[in-house]
Amino acid sequence: MTLSVSLKHRFADLTLEVAFQGSGRLTALFGPSGCGKTSVINAIAGLLRPDRATITLDGTTFADDGAGTWLPPHCRRVGYVFQDSRLLPHLTVKQNLRYGRWFTAPAERYADEASVVALLGLSPLLDRKPAHLSGGEKQRVAIGRALLQSPRLLLMDEPLASLDEARKLEILPYVERLRDEVKVPIVYVSHTLSEVARLATDVVLMAKGRVAGAGSVRDVLPQLAQAGDELAQDAGVLLDARFKDFDAANELTTLASPAGDVRVAGRLATPGGQCRVHIRAADVMLATTRPQEISALNIFEGEVTAITELPGAALEVRIRTGSCFLSSRITRFSASRLGIAPGKPVFAVVKTMQVRPPGR
């Protein structure tokens, strides 16, 4: 799938000027509230007609103001999952699911009802009405209804925003299955880094109506340091890791990662399992000699490769360690005191309690 979006639109309090291409399994539009993310997917869906727009999906033109083309929403075959489930209250779960099929001609339907029900774990719910569902269950039904449209593209507008933490953790594995097992590409809107880090293959970082960065989730995450105060605190790196060992007596998991072994509190993954871990730049301390007798268990030897100046007192230091990079945010004073400069050997120190999988 290749989704190409270029649009401009002026609102009373925001000028939206966005251009990007998405070709991953799940492309996240990520940024603070009010930056225009929902307006972008509304334009993709045809619910907002921008002042200027060119939008194509795999050669099908949804919009091209130069050619005078504007495909109506019902002709785009785009599934949409909103923040709230928007289920029809007088219909059962089964009837709500089947309602989605009405929007696609029989000859174009590919989604199988039984497969969607199994994928989302909906079998026990089929005869219930929405009033008797939890928030997480309602969102699973909403996702199923969108899938049964047999969409070319699935749009998800902060689908976990209205859920508490327990319900979010319930839904996230289903979205992961959706990303990995269903062939339909997804554009996922969120302002929550933990969701994006766990789910996304690609990210479009937005700020004040514009694209501040775009690319793979691993390439974009370090750019958050320069994307404004609201996002800067979560800047860091994602590491793909695999289970190595579990110390039951101390409740510690050891993961093998490109940076070296990483120790994480609690049981994470199982033998042979893989996961992502997020290490924020703000949680990485630097030392010029290997620290001794400290509580932190994660110490990575590396070399400074770049330094980026940030607003205020901070610097972002990029360190090559193992076969990957870590980032550390320290003050200018500390950098000067330690003589931090490109080429400098350093040790990156991360407390075990600060390393966690995205979404937790």
Image: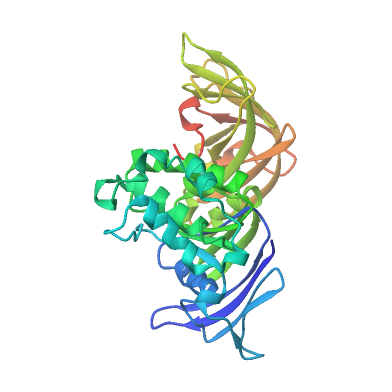
| Total residue callouts | 0
Quadrant hosting residue 98: bottom left
Q: Residue furthest top?
A: 249
The answer, for residue 359, to whether it is visible in the render is yes
Q: Is residue 332 visible?
A: no
Q: How is the image coloured?
A: rainbow
Residue 95 in the image: state x and y as whole percent.
Answer: 37, 56
**Quarter of the image with the C terminus in it:** top left
Q: What is the quadrant of the N terminus in the image?
A: bottom right
Counting from the top left corner in percent of width and height, residue 64 is at 63, 84
Up the image or down, 274 lies above or below 96; here it is above
The extreme front residue here reads 106
**Location of residue 116 in the rendering, given as x and y in whole percent from the top left corner:** 51, 47
Q: Nearer the viewer, residue 262 or 124?
A: 124
Left or right of 3 in this view: 187: left
x, y percent for residue 339: 64, 39
Q: Name which quarter of the figure residue 63 lies in.
A: bottom right
| Whether residue 313 is situated above or below residue 58 in the rendered picture | above
Name the residue nearer the viewer: 287 or 26: 26
Q: Residue at x 39, y 43 (%)?
A: 168
Indicate whether 264 appears above or below 232.
Answer: above
Residue drawn at point x = 57 percent, y = 65 percent? 106
Residues 173 and 90: in front is: 90
Q: Is residue 168 left or right of residue 288?
A: left
Task: Classify residue 249 as left or right of residue 3.
Answer: left
